[in-house]
Image (cartoon, rainbow, N blue to C red):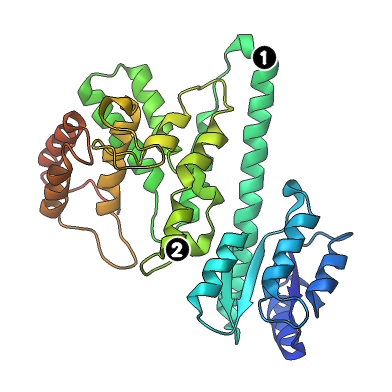
Amino acid sequence: MDWVAVVDDDKSNLIQAGQILSENHIRVTALRSGTALLEFVKNSKPDLILLDIRMPEMDGFETLKRLKEQLPAEERIPVIFLTGNDDPDSETQGLQLGAMDFIKKPFVADVLVLRVKHTIELVRLQRDLSAEVAKKTEEAEKRAKENESLSIHVVQTLAEAIDAKDKYTNGHSGRVAYYSREIARRYGYDEKRQDEIYMMGLLHDVGKIGVPDAVINKPGRLTDEEFAIIKKHPDMGYHILEKIQEMPKLMTGARWHHERHDGRGYPDGLAGDAIPEEARIIAVGDAYDAMTSHRSYREILPQSAVRKEIENGRGTQFDPVFADIMLKMIDDDTDYNMHEK
């Protein structure tokens, strides 16, 4: 049974949250202060903490700071803030501190239950996948001479976990991998290199595992602070994948798929041929899928509009060679089948 600690100085909020969660077979521990929470987690490890922001003596922000100082990284418990207002500054501060999401008060029962269960399931999946990758890495270090490759099943599972964080996309990583492999095939890569770039494409967004759901799924325009958080995902992805010795180039797509041909991309501001070739290919596939997928603020773009954007980005955002290949793929797709279904 999932276990949630609810921290709120308002007794009525504790009772309401407790009833809603208990009726949905979730174990609940109610606490009235941040101090009580810090004492509680010394000997107890719930799956999730619902933490009120406005509390006397020690507010939710200070409580989360102390919680992170008290618990080692591998034992940290995911936190969702409870808030009674829509203050964007509070959301930004909470996300920067590491909160995974926000839930508004008064509670909407279905929303509370879905967000709690989704967060617990996602964190559990992330930990299972991290453990699997760590296991594979450890095995590789012990058998380095055997040149054991990472299982495609593990990579696909990890890609699905990445896509699950974004409720506005479905199968993004798989489509980017497919488009990247097709560009590589048309460019002349042999089958082995096509498979390599497919794997890179599957994991190009792996760093988003470390980005709070509330930022990834925000329907409106991101603040500068939130965009700065998003921009960290290439570096996070690089550090996740660099330890996989069996596939030393796997981290290439993760780190450099947001670089631009004109040098105005991130995280390293590389330009032209200084950007690894595979990353230049993935960048085109990634941009194409972004335009041909559903978003909270728009539907799939018409094929003519997508083609025009790729053409306009040729030589600035995209390597001209790979942009031209994508343009040919668009022209070949006469029934416009290359998009999110």
Furthest-bottom residue in this view: 12
Q: Is residue 116 left or right of residue 303?
A: right
On the rendered image, what quadrant is the N terminus found in? bottom right
> What is the count of numbered marks?
2
Q: Tag 1, which secondary structure?
A: loop
Please give the name of the residue rendered at 53% of the width and 71% of the height, measured from the top-left corner.
91
Q: Position of residue 42 (x, y in %)?
A: 87, 60
Density class for disc 1 (Cα within 10 Å; few <14, some 14-19, many ≥20) is: few
The residue that appears at 74% across and 68% down in the rendered structure is 63
Identify the image quadrant of residue 182.
top left
Q: Amino acid at mark 2?
A: Asn
Query: Is residue 292 shown to the viewer in this render?
Result: no
Q: Are marks 2 and 1 in contact (CB under 8 Å)?
A: no
Q: Give the structural element (helix, strand or loop) at label 2.
A: loop
Measuring from the top left, give residue 321's x and y in whole percent.
17, 28
- N-term-proximal mark, 2 vs 1: 1
Q: In x, y percent, where is residue 252?
A: 42, 30
Picture layout, residue 164 above or below residue 87: above
> Viewer-nearest of labels 2 and 1?
2
Name, please, the residue furthest toward the top.
145
Residue that carries the numbered disc 1 in the rendered image:
143
Q: Image point 73% across, 54% down: which residue?
A: 76
Q: CA distance from mark 2 to mark 1?
A: 41 Å
Residue 256 vs residue 28, the one in the foreground = 256
Which residue is tagged 2? 217
